[in-house]
């Protein structure tokens, strides 16, 4: 896995599981206070790509093209939160919800159709909640859940274009940790913004699905 030590002075301190599971119990520390993080020997389980070999190979280029605007909206949410911009995040959340609902369902066949139905429902639900978030703390909490759904989408169906980057912050959510996806391999922390913009590490390169 490709990793950067962007989290200055902090070891891999969180206890987090893959987005499909529940976050582990970890002592809470004051957000924004690296000194509050206790030392752990625990290695969090990073999301895998076990579905990619069985599903993505059957996904056509048209599906990946249709999903591109949804990934774009998600990345707009991600960067808006990293920039502490609640209004921009709300707009991008609303766009993500609309985009998820606008994808042509007929493009998905077989097992991929069922997977898309489940994942897109979660994306629309969380994106809708994010669009109505009362403050940036609430918007960031929703981002955790939206990211789990988007990581599931990427692992299960994939994406076209360039590389994505699986990113992790051990201090997010009271030190239970959180994963998200980025388009760049420098950490832009959506959970802390300017307070700790580089807190976290790049865990893995997520390559696009190749066709032809």
Image: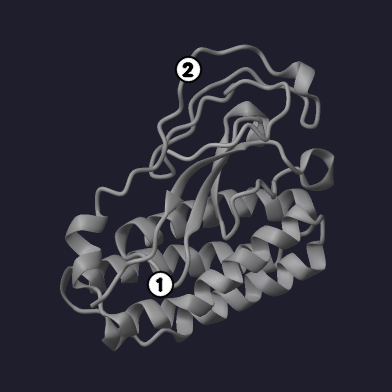
Q: Residues within 10 Å of mark 2 (few under 14, many from 20)?
A: few
Corner quadrant of residue 43: top left
User: Which residue does the numbered mark 2 point to in the structure image?
Assistant: 42
Distance, label 2 to label 1, CA atoms, is: 34 Å
**Mark with earlier residue (2, 1):** 2
- Residue 123 percent across, percent down from the top left: 48, 65
User: Which residue does the numbered mark 1 point to in the structure image?
Assistant: 160
The residue positioned 40% from the left and 72% from the top of the image is: 160
The quarter of the picture where the C terminus appears is bottom left
The residue positioned 83% from the left and 40% from the top of the image is: 195
Left or right? Give the position of 124 relative to 152: right
- Residue 34 percent across, percent down from the top left: 76, 23
SS for dot 1: loop
Q: Which labelled disc corresponds to residue 77? A: none
The quarter of the picture where the N terminus appears is top left
Left or right? Give the position of 88 relative to 205: right
């Amino acid at each position: 896995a490709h990793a950067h030590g962007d989290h200055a002075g902090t070891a891999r301190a969180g206890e987090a599981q893959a987005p499909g599971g529940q976050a582990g119990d970890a002592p809470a520390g004051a957000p924004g206070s690296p000194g509050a993080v206790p030392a752990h020997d625990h290695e969090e389980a990073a999301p895998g790509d076990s579905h990619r070999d069985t599903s993505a190979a059957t996904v056509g280029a048209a599906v990946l093209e249709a999903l591109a605007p949804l990934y774009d909206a998600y990345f707009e949410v991600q960067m808006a939160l990293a920039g502490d911009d609640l209004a921009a995040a709300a707009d991008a959340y609303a766009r993500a919800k609309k985009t998820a609902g606008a994808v042509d369902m007929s493009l998905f066949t077989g097992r991929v159709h069922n997977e898309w139905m489940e994942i897109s429902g979660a994306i629309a639900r969380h994106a809708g909640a994010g669009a109505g978030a009362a403050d940036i703390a609430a918007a960031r909490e929703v981002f955790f859940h939206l990211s789990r759904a988007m990581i599931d989408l990427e692992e299960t169906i994939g994406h076209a274009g360039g590389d994505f980057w699986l990113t992790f912050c051990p201090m997010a959510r009271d030190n239970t940790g959180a994963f998200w996806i980025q388009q760049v391999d420098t950490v832009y922390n959506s959970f802390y913004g300017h307070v700790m913009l580089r807190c976290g590490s790049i865990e893995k390169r997520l390559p696009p699905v190749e066709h032809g």
